[in-house]
Image (cartoon, rainbow, N blue to C red):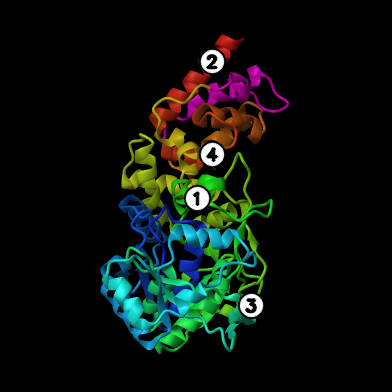
Amino acid sequence: MVRVRFAPSPTGYLHIGSARTFIFNWLFARHHGGAMILRIDDTDVERNTEESLASIFEGLRWLDLGWDEEYRQSERFHLYREAAQALLDKGVAYRDFTPADAKASADEGDNRGGWLCHPEMRALSREESDRRAAAGEPFVLRFRVPREPERTVTFRDLVYGEQSKSTADIEDFALLRSSGAPTYHHASCVDDADMRISHIIRGQDHLTNTFKHVLLFEALGAPVPEFAHLPLLIAPDGAKLSKRRHGPVVSVLTYRDAGFLPHAYVNFLCLLGWNPKDDREKMSREELIEAFSLEGVNRSNAVVNFTEDDPIDPKALWLNSQHIYSLPVERLAELLEPVWRNAGYEVTREKALRVTPLIQERIKTLNDAVSVADFFFLRELAPYDPAELIPQKGDAAMALRALEKALAVLPDGDFTHAAIEERLRAAASEIGLKAGQMFQPIRVAVCGRRNAPPLFETLEVVGRETCLERIARAIELLNRKS
């Protein structure tokens, strides 16, 4: 059975690269009918914070994918200690009593090729090691990497192909710190073995760690999982995306707060380093699950396009607009209601359902609906330039004729969009104006702008009383201007 895991460390918000790793794991699990495990790697007590953990969960829940099992490494320390003791008893781990300052000196001294081990610590007898440990001498527990004879560690990465490295180039990595806390390598492999993880799908920056992990899985007597390393996400200048350098650009919540649909953002992240082997870009959740395979993951790093002035990738914005356009009106209205309320608008479900179809193809994010639809909710329009009321190739007198005629014909009769259209077209003909010359002044008077949703439907939703008040106000503005 396919079992995959996502294992974030709670040291900050959810990075978009981490979110993509979560999504790829989730899709792989769902494609194969497997299990998705969320494991919080919170063994580093000095760097972990509950605030960061809450932020990670907030980001994951917004993505709206879910998981099947959940664990916290801080609740599993007994397993790491038991596994460490077993490795020590088997002779594949040893205690290193070298003081930290001596270790640093070795790193900076003659061994410029990099620190691999302290031979005297590897050669220490078990009896002597036990005696010094019992006496309270601090130590780091290290993995005994095979040296004589050395061997080649090989694994087949499902993205990058066969990878090999000599144990002569692998240091005796730590399993337990001097505090007794497990290192990343040890806790991760013990958990992967205990949780029966079948595939480890993670960022390419972990590729070099995998040689150590293969050795450790073998020493634990556990099956070695399949590995798939994902290309990195990089900035337009080629730099790796980092929280420190790029700030909100790399936070999932930046996109949530900008008004993105969760699935649209999932769709966008999927296309950073993966393709469905056809020309599809906008894809539903079901389509992504069906199409996803590790064979479609690219080896090249993926660029997230942003600028100093705008952290949002234009491709993400386009995809979000496409998903908004395809939402059922009822669902989009449900999503827009809280957006409008947060902007201070008084909105009912009925009003939301009437406004939404008029603006659905005019917004790229949910937040756009605040400015695009403001005139539907505001009692008074924001100030606008009266010159906007004047039609192209027209003058103020023409605008006044159009508005005064509208003010005369709109008070009576049905106020449906069909009835409004019939009366206004007839009115334009009566006063010798073309349709555009008649409608532009009315559109600006009612909406406060030239670019607005379809006029007749808009007038119907705004309502007769408000339309008449705004048209009268526009006439006052033109008279004052002249």
Distance from Cα at disc 3 to Cα at disc 4: 56 Å
Distance from Cα at disc 2 to Cα at disc 3: 68 Å
Whichever of labels 4 and 2 marks the residue nearer the N terminus, that label is: 4
Question: Are the residues at dot 2 and dot 3 in contact (C-beta closer than 8 Å)?
Answer: no
* Amino acid type of the residue that numbered disc 2 sits on in the rendered structure: Leu
- Residue at 44% x, 39% y is 460
Q: Which residue is mark 2?
A: 477
- In front of the other: 320 or 433: 320
Image side of residue 418 versus residue 394, left or right = left
**Residues packed near mark 4 inside 10 Å, few (<14), some (14 to 19) or many (20 plus):** some
Whichever of labels 2 and 3 marks the residue nearer the N terminus, that label is: 3
User: Where's residue 479, x and y in %?
Assistant: 56, 11
Under tag 1, what secondary structure? helix
Q: Which mark is residue 360?
A: 1
- The secondary structure that dominates the magenta segment is helix
- In front of the other: 306 or 177: 177
**Residues packed near mark 2 inside 10 Å, few (<14), some (14 to 19) or many (20 plus):** some
* Amino acid type of the residue that numbered disc 1 sits on in the rendered structure: Gln
Residue 264 shows in the view: no
Whichever of labels 1 and 4 marks the residue nearer the N terminus, that label is: 1
Q: Which mark is residue 455?
A: 4
Which quadrant, please, contains the N terminus? bottom left
User: Where's residue 369, x and y in %?
Assistant: 47, 43
Under tag 4, what secondary structure? helix
- In front of the other: 181 or 454: 181
Q: Which residue is mark 3?
A: 160
Residue 439 lies in the magenta stretch: no
